[in-house]
């Protein structure tokens, strides 16, 4: 390279051709610049696709799920005829109890006959077909009312009944006269009748609190299904996860980060934890089924078992984030504590741990949010396939009685054949996502407010 | 009964623990004549020491006892049940669950006052209809109670209550001894802090080893049941057979190959969606985007990763599937006017949605890896006159390639183990087919369907789920270990 110092020996650089100019790009440069633009555009397109998918997903959830928060109600004045409900006339609760829901159905027919007489509605429907626009649970609602207060027998009371899911779908635009051509549950004449009742103001659609706090219902009554009981199930599971995963996770991280000597055993534990974090969640379900249910005979479908399985699943997440926040505490804090005579254990528990607490809390909330949305392991320990109808009455029954959980309830609805349940499933997703967004927001706020940069 | 007794024992131990804490603390102070400066440790440490010695051994023994007692009782009770009943009841587990149920029913009947405790121990099924009796108190039995089963149940109750009694005695005894010893040794020169810290360290180690125990639990639980499965079903059919046709009357074809085919096909489609989009998004975010775009786009993309998989499953089943059907199916009414797709569940449905789910996974991993490529390499390339895209393609990506391969492998392992999207979106038909518009099934889907509903843990049709789970575990573990190895190797290269 010594030649380079003597430029005269090198032939002078001649322009590639007479046309060459810095102001005019030649073909190759144009090609390279075009390639540059294309490449950048690929990136923009990729991000746009990602965003588009997010928007489609969110739009889809909201547009299909908000309907579940509204429900169609039918207002009726029902005469509680004494000759039907209390033949002996003595208002004895035991005798009243013997009248089954079948005994209440005729009252609803009478109520409809009165209604058309009052409002002057002309219809060729039989009273039974008119009552068919109500939910199948309407007679039970009447019966519960009468049993709660037998003195009401003989009076006429105004009730609000849930409309059947088909009528509800008609008001929400899901059911039309074309779509019910082969439907045994409702006829076009009934829809005409519904139109007339809407004109008369007896049928209206409004907010339905029962979807949020109510229990699941049987296949035949999608209009009555709610998320409430499964929400309680999820709550108890999260309680178990929090009570077990947080202390165990923090203890494990403290050991691995502060005390563990560097040897093969701690290496194995570390590799193990990072691998556990990537094990498919369904494998944890198999573990739960084999160990907690088949071996320890804990009750099937219990939130306790669900919580234990989710604890094992969340532990690696919590350990990884706790270790990161312990690592972020500068060594000078430890050295200072040791320097004024604290023991190793005191320096960790009195100084490092409090400083790392916001980070640990953030990681725990994110781990909990992850556990809250997990479905697959819950399928294997039996938290689907039945109707979670009664809210638990104590902490023990909340932990041990069969229950569902929010994601499992959504799965259950998605599996049912009636499209009315799909709306419930999307609505359930909205509720689930509200919880997840709240938890993640809290985590972000905690991090912003308390995280210290050293 | 047993539960409430356990509860009382725990409560008693806790009360004793608190008492020991204060007793030891004041004892230590009094040995120093009230001058805390003479104590070896802070006064509270004497209390912690006493509390630790009272509670930990007692509760530990109790836990072991509670786990071991049912097994020992079952073993001894099982000897009382003659072969005849086991044969009729088809398996030991089923008969034992009958026994447990009757015993529980008797407990409930006693608790409700339907019968007295001595009656419960002495009734014979010849004399009284046990099924009706238990039905009254709300315990429904499937069949009439055999005298031997009733006898075994009574024995079970007796042993349980004897066991519970002795457990209470032993646990409380251990707690008392622990409390007494630790209070006696609490003198001024006792090195209380060191003992407490050793104990705390032991607890920390125990917590850390839970991770290993979980792995061991996963492997053992699946291994045992898989061995049971291979006793009932030939392993050659499982690994090399050609068809999956479970038949609950027995004689099923249970081969993993068609399921593996479905799993891999869906995963490949998912990766074909996720890897290009995720990779280009990562390249744009790390090389082109300004800080504002980056700080807005990155968290938005990561929202996709935080959405629960059940949401994606529903999205596949109710949105993407029907949309695909309206393009590729429905004969003349479809967009293309072809009849290629009959139902919403298909390989393409599940693959597309899983791809969307994996985009942020690939992009954030690749983003980290691209950012780890030293700036000097880029600067060198720019200095030679390369454009930014040439630098990325010819310098940054080759340097980041091992890391990106690791990221793709991790994404593949996620795709293989994903459950909810395929349960709802992929279908239930096991077959070898190349058509992405057909429904196919996967390993995870079959695990769910074999283990939900009425399951009999003695039939190969149920046990096959454990063999499938073990295969899945080994597969994903292998991919993860390989991926982590590659990523780690790559990181070392530039550190």
Image (cartoon, rainbow, N blue to C red):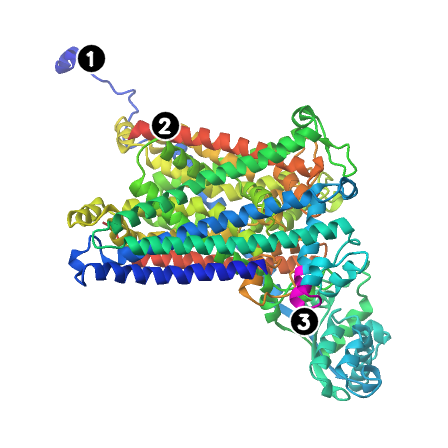
Whichever of labels 3 and 1 marks the residue nearer the N terminus, that label is 1
Image x and y of residue B93, in percent: 68, 43
Image x and y of residue A199, in percent: 72, 78
Image x and y of residue A226, in percent: 62, 64
Label placed on residue B489: 2
Task: Label 2, secondary structure: give it.
Answer: helix
Residue pictured at 74% horizontal, 73% vertical: A140
Label placed on residue A72: 3
Residue pictured at 73% horizontal, 70% vertical: A137
Numbered disc 1: what chain? A
Per the model, the C-alpha gap separating discs 2 and 3 is: 62 Å
Label placed on residue B61: none
Q: Is residue B134 shown in magenta? A: no
Label 1 crowd (10 A; few <14 / some 14-19 / many >=20): few
Callout in the foreground (2, 3): 2
Label 2 crowd (10 A; few <14 / some 14-19 / many >=20): few
Label placed on residue A11: 1
Image x and y of residue A388, in percent: 64, 61
């Amino acid at each position: 390279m010594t030649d380079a110092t003597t430029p005269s020996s090198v032939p002078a650089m001649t322009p590639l051709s007479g046309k060459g100019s810095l102001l005019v790009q030649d073909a190759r440069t144009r090609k390279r610049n075009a390639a540059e633009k294309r490449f950048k555009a690929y990136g923009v397109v990729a991000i746009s696709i990602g965003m588009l998918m997010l928007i489609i997903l969110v739009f889809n959830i909201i547009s299909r799920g908000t309907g579940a928060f509204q429900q169609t109600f039918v207002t009726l004045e029902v005469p509680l005829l004494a000759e039907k409900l209390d033949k002996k006339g003595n208002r004895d609760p035991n005798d009243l109890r013997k009248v089954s829901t079948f005994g209440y159905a005729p009252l609803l027919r009478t109520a409809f006959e009165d209604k058309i007489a009052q409002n002057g509605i002309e219809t060729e429907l039989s009273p039974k077909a008119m009552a068919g626009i109500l939910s199948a649970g309407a007679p039970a609602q009447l019966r519960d009312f009468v049993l709660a207060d037998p003195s009401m027998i003989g009076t006429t009371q105004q009730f609000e009944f849930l409309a059947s899911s088909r009528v509800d779908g008609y008001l929400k635009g899901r059911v039309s006269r074309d779509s019910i051509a082969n439907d045994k549950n409702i006829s076009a004449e009934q829809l005409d009748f519904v139109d007339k009742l809407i004109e008369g103001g007896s049928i209206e659609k409004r907010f339905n609190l029962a979807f949020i706090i109510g229990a699941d219902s049987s296949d035949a009554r999608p209009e009555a299904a709610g998320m409430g009981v499964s929400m309680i199930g999820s709550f108890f599971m999260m309680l178990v996860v929090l009570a077990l995963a947080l202390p165990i996770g923090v203890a494990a991280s403290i050991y691995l980060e502060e005390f563990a000597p560097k040897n093969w055993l701690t290496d194995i534990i570390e590799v193990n934890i990072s691998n556990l974090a990537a094990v498919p969640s369904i494998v944890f379900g198999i573990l739960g089924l084999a160990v907690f249910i088949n071996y320890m005979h804990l009750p099937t479908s219990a939130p306790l078992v669900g919580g234990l399985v989710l604890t094992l699943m969340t532990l690696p997440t919590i350990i990884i984030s706790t270790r990161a926040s312990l690592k972020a505490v500068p060594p000078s804090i430890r050295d200072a504590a040791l320097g004024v005579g604290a023991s190793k254990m005191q320096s960790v528990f009195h100084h490092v741990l409090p400083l790392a607490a916001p980070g640990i809390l953030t990681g725990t909330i994110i781990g909990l949010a992850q556990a809250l949305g997990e479905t697959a392991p819950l399928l294997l320990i039996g938290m689907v396939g039945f109707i979670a109808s009664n809210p638990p009455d104590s902490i023990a029954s909340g932990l041990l009685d069969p229950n569902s959980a929010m994601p499992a309830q959504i799965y259950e609805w998605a599996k049912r054949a009636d499209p009315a349940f799909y709306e419930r499933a999307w609505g359930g997703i909205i509720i689930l996502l509200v919880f997840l967004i709240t938890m993640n927001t809290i985590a972000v706020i905690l991090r912003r407010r308390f995280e210290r940069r050293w | 009964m047993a539960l409430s007794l356990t509860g009382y024992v725990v409560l008693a131990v806790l009360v004793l623990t608190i008492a020991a804490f204060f007793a030891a603390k004041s004892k230590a102070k009094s040995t120093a004549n009230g001058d805390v400066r003479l104590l070896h440790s802070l006064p509270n440490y004497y209390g912690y020491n006493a509390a630790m010695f009272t509670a930990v051994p007692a509760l530990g023994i109790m836990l072991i006892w509670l786990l071991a007692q049912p097994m020992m009782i079952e073993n001894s009770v099982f000897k009382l049940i003659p072969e005849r009943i086991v044969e009729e009841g088809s398996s030991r587990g089923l008969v034992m669950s009958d026994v447990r149920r009757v015993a529980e029913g008797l407990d409930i009947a006693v608790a409700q006052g339907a019968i007295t405790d001595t009656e419960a121990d002495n009734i014979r099924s010849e004399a009284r209809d046990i099924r009706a009796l238990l039905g009254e108190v709300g315990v429904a039995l499937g069949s009439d109670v055999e005298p031997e089963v009733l006898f075994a149940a009574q024995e079970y109750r007796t042993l349980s209550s004897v066991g519970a009694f002795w457990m209470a005695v032993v646990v409380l005894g251990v707690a008392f001894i622990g409390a007494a010893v630790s209070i006696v040794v609490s003198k001024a020169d006792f090195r209380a802090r060191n003992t407490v810290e050793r104990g705390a360290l032991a607890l920390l180690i125990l917590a850390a080893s839970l991770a290993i125990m979980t792995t061991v639990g996963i492997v053992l639980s699946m291994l045992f049941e898989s061995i049971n499965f291979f006793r009932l079903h030939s392993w050659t059919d499982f690994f090399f057979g050609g068809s999956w046709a479970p038949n609950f009357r027995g004689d099923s074809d249970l081969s993993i190959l068609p399921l593996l085919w479905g799993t891999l096909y869906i995963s490949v489609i998912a990766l074909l969606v996720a890897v290009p989009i995720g990779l280009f998004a990562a390249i744009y975010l790390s090389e082109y985007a300004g800080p504002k775009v980056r700080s807005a786009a990155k968290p938005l993309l990561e929202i996709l990763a935080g959405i629960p998989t059940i949401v994606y499953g529903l999205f596949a089943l109710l949105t993407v599937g029907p949309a695909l059907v309206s393009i590729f199916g429905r004969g003349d009414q479809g967009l293309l006017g072809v009849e290629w797709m009959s139902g919403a569940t298909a390989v393409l449905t599940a693959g597309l949605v899983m791809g969307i789910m994996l985009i942020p996974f690939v992009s954030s991993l690749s983003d980290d890896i691209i950012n780890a490529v030293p700036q000097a390499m880029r600067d060198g390339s720019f200095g030679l006159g390369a454009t930014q895209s040439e630098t990325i393609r010819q310098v940054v990506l080759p340097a980041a390639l091992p890391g990106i391969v690791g990221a793709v492998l991790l994404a593949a392992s996620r795709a293989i183990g994903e459950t909810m999207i395929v349960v709802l979106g992929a279908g239930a038909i096991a077959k070898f087919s190349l058509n992405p518009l057909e429904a196919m099934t996967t390993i995870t889907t079959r695990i769910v369907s074999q283990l939900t509903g009425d399951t009999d843990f003695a039939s190969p049709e149920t046990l096959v789920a454990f063999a499938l789970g073990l295969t899945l575990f080994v597969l994903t573990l292998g991919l993860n270990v390989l991926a982590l190895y590659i990523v780690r190797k790559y990181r070392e290269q530039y550190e």
